[in-house]
Image (spheres, helix red, strand yellow):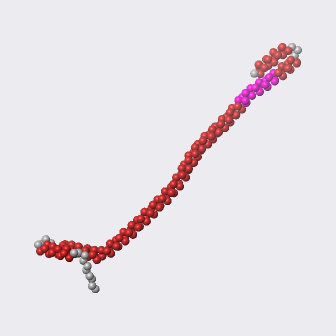
């Protein structure tokens, strides 16, 4: 298996980097220990991954980014559609709720006025019944003495008529009837 390295770096730049690395090593500016070797290997690994797989990684990341972008766009579109549907639903409900509010207010007012009318009618009915009872009792009270007086007058008149018919002296008969009347009361 042969792999071909194709460097896009200017050969002079690569020569300068190599010379700088050799000079820095000989002057002990770069000390070779574990950490240094790990850092050099890490940067070499990153460079080789970028060089050989950079286009593939970029395309893969771009595809994932586009997929995520489309999903977010679809979720935003779906959310906007749901929000518009909810808004239309609420716009349909708001007039109904206003009508229901007006109806409930008018029903409460009608219930209050109906209750007042019922109370007023009941009060009038009770007042009328009490008036009828008082009228009946008053008439009964008034009629009892009147009836008693009428009975007394009938008895007195009958007694006077009998006395006048029986006696020859009518004035004495009237006086006797008057005495009887006083004794009866």
Left or right, residue 119 beside residue 20? right
Q: The C terminus appears in which quarter of the rendering?
A: top right
Q: Which residue is rendered at x = 71% and y = 32% of the image?
A: 136
Left or right, residue 39 beside residue 73? left
Q: Quadrant of residue 6?
A: bottom left
Q: Looking at this view, is 6 or 153 the one in front? A: 6
Q: Whole-percent x and y of residue 110? A: 60, 44
Answer above or below: position of 96 versus 151: below
Q: Is residue 107 visible?
A: yes
Q: Whole-percent x and y of residue 119? A: 62, 40
Q: Is residue 32 visible?
A: no
Q: The N terminus appears in which quarter of the rendering?
A: bottom left
Q: Looking at this view, is 24 or 104 the one in front? A: 24
Q: Whole-percent x and y of residue 121? A: 65, 39
Answer above or below: position of 170 versus 49: above
Find out whether residue 139 is within the magenta segment.
yes
In the current view of this chain or complex, which residue is farthest to the bottom? 1
Q: Find the magenta span and give its range.
A: 137-156
Query: Which secondary structure is most common in the magenta stretch?
Result: helix
């Amino acid at each position: 298996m042969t792999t071909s390295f194709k460097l896009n770096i200017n050969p002079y730049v690569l020569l300068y980097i190599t010379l700088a690395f050799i000079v820095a090593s000989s002057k002990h500016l770069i000390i070779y220990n574990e950490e240094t070797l790990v850092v050099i290997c890490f940067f070499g690994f990153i460079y080789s991954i970028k060089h050989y797989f950079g286009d593939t990684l970029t395309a893969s990341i771009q595809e994932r980014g586009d997929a995520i972008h489309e999903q977010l766009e679809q979720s935003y579109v779906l959310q906007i559609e749901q929000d518009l549907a909810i808004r239309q639903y609420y716009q349909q409900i708001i007039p109904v709720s206003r009508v229901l509010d007006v109806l409930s207010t008018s029903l409460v007012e009608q219930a209050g006025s109906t209750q007042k009318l019922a109370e007023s009618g009941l009060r009038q009915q009770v007042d009328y019944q009490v008036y009828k009872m008082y009228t009946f009792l008053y008439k009964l009270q008034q009629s009892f003495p009147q009836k008693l007086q009428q009975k007394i007058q009938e008895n007195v008149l009958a007694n006077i008529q009998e006395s006048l018919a029986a006696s020859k002296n009518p004035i004495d008969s009237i006086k006797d009837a008057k005495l009887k009347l006083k004794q009866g009361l």
